[in-house]
Amino acid sequence: MKARGIQVDIPHPLAGRVPQLANPMRFSATPIEYHVAPPMLGQHNDDVLRELLGMGADEIERLPQTHVVD
């Protein structure tokens, strides 16, 4: 990664700077920018449960009690 210049370090809220694999394609007119670190564990659970699975707030709130999600 380093030799080919495709390593980027992205700031992460808990881990500091996290090395990531950059896109190997290079565009002179539109360079690729990296702004978002990898998500935290469970960071998007509510979005997925609500938007993709159609669950309501009450259902989502009960899931940790049944250990389906933590």
Image: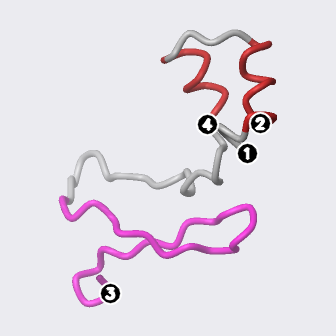
- Answer yes or no: do the residues labelled 1 and 3 have beta carbons within 8 Å? no
Looking at the picture, how far across and down is residue 30, in whole percent? Answer: 29, 45
Q: State the residue position of label 4.
A: 44
Please state, as top left, top right, bottom left or bottom right, where the C terminus lies in the image.
top right
The magenta span reads 1-25
Disc 1 from disc 3: Cα separation: 36 Å
Disc 2 from disc 1: Cα separation: 5 Å
Residue at screen point 59% across, 23% down:
49
Disc 3 from disc 4: Cα separation: 31 Å
Question: How many marks do you count on the picture?
Answer: 4
Residue at screen point 49% across, 75% down:
19
- Of the residues under marks 2 and 4, which one precedes in the sequence? 4
Disc 3 from disc 2: Cα separation: 41 Å
Label at residue 36: none
User: Quick one: label 1, few (<14), some, or many (20+) residues within 10 Å?
Assistant: few
Q: State the residue position of label 3.
A: 2
Q: In the rendered structure, does residue 43 fall within the stretch colored magenta?
A: no
The amino acid marked with disc number 2 is Pro
Q: State the residue position of label 2.
A: 64
Q: Quadrant of residue 7?
A: bottom left
Looking at the picture, how far across and down is residue 45, in whole percent? Answer: 63, 34
Label at residue 70: 1
Q: Nearer the viewer, mark 3 or mark 4?
A: 4
- Of the residues under marks 3 and 4, which one precedes in the sequence? 3
Looking at the picture, how far across and down is residue 60, in whole percent? Answer: 72, 22
Residue 8 horizontal side relative to residue 29, left or right: right
Q: Nearer the viewer, mark 3 or mark 2?
A: 2
In front here: 59 or 44?
59
Q: Quadrant of residue 54?
A: top right
